[in-house]
Amino acid sequence: MPTAAVVGAGLSGLTAAHRLSTAGWSVRVFEAAPRVGGRTVSDRIGGYLVDGGASALGASYRAYLDLVAEVGLTTVPSSPYIGIYRDGRIHHLRLDRLVRSALGTRVLSARAKLRAVRLAVDLVRARAAGYLDYSDMRRSAPLDTETARDYALRALDAELEEYLCGPVVRCMLIAGTDRVSRVELFSGLANIFSSRIHALVGGQGRLAEELAGRLDVALSDPVERVADLGHRVAVTHSGTADEFDACVVSAPLPVAREICPDRAAVLGPLHDALGYTQAITVAVGTRIAPDSPAMLVQMPAKEDPDIALLFLEHHKAPDRAPPGHGLIGCDWDTAAAEKWMGATDEEIVEHTLASLRRVFPELFAGAADPVELTHVTRWRHALPLTSVGAYRHIGEFNAALDPADRIQFAGDYMSAAGQNTAVEFGTRAAHNLLSR
């Protein structure tokens, strides 16, 4: 029976371990944290089910949804409404009637809607040319030449940059359009506005928990080094060295580079080119639900520089809040998260509630305090910051990897970050080892 170590019990690592285990391998998963899931974590708190990291799923996430069905879990469709906040009100769009609602919305002027035709044409051309092929990001090079803001101001106009491009990019990376590549804008448009949104029953962390329950997982057991012995792989963890036939490294890029000195030649250039965003998520449970039917309210930076997204979790899935109550997941912009990371939970909650009072005044109209739950989650390594040129480096990194290597990689730095690509690259790493 072949043996394998998997470093990291996030979604990609657990997927790789699951694929190897079902193929007959003996697999051991090492996780430095005291729980599995990475950035797909869920907690039950006082009747609420809080997703502290990754939140929603596109209906186009075939690899993820197939794995969910394979292990016997289920998803439910979320509310088809999304909102964009402008000038003191939420403007709603229906994803299942997108063209009709987009033509009728007042979030954009008539002139901006006409200019948006150029964006739609550019997106269709990019998809047709294969520039958004997540399996080979080198093909994104023709798009990866300017920031999302530079593209919007050059090809569109300031209004579309502020109230369409900006909210989409903030939804993808929780960062401003001036910090990320145009690839993120096109990828976000393709994902957000082309399919219905789903949620995993039991919380977004449920898939990781289900996979981990079928595997041998060592928690609070950090790996210090992965060494290529030629015929074997030595994994040093908590001061102990064990040997395996192969290894999948599914840790964040800075950790992977540190523990894999034998692969510094391929990891180093990408590490130097790719940073990570920081993130703060605040869950707010309320005794009544907001009036909006939206599952997601996007906050343009002009309207709120600090809060980027508001997930109305009770519209995402019915198990997220008690009946009649509301649960709002507030995702901070990475620039604000970087400044507030050291603040107390009380300070972060107070600042978040100030935004909610403005967006959902109906919650605070009565004399009683509507808030019955607050929960703060901090992510010092949230998502890879894909600035201009990053996808070229990602493509070069993937091309430099040897599919026959005993050490395989499956990280969020190998494509556009997301739950679906985590499953895809975890599966790819396992397939490479099985093909040996």
Image (tube, rainbow, N blue to C red):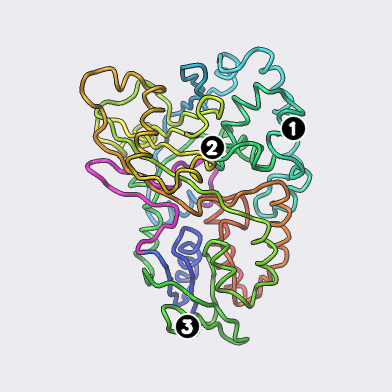
> Would residue 158 be found to the left or right of residue 236 on screen?
right
Q: Which mark is residue 171?
A: 2
Which secondary structure is most common in the magenta stretch? loop
Where in the figure is residue 366, as x and y percent of width and height?
24, 18
User: As displayed, is residue 91 above or below residue 190?
Assistant: above
Where in the figure is residue 208, as x and y percent of width and height?
40, 57
Disc 2 marks a residue whose amino acid type is Cys
Tell which tag, 1 or 3, sits nearer the viewer.
Answer: 1
Q: CA distance from mark 1 to mark 3?
A: 51 Å
* In the foreground, 85 or 368: 368
**Residue bounds of the magenta highlight:** 34-63
Where in the figure is residue 294, as x and y percent of width and height?
43, 26
> Would residue 329 be found to the left or right of residue 186 on screen?
left
Q: Secondary structure at mark 2?
A: helix
Name the image quarter holding residue 125.
top right
Disc 3 marks a residue whose amino acid type is Met
Quarter of the figure that contains the C terminus: bottom right
**Neighbour class for label 2 at 10 Å: few (<14), some, many (≥20)?**
many
Residue for point 73% across, 33% down: 151
Where in the figure is residue 367, as x and y percent of width and height?
21, 19
Name the image quarter holding residue 156.
top right
Q: Secondary structure at mark 1?
A: helix
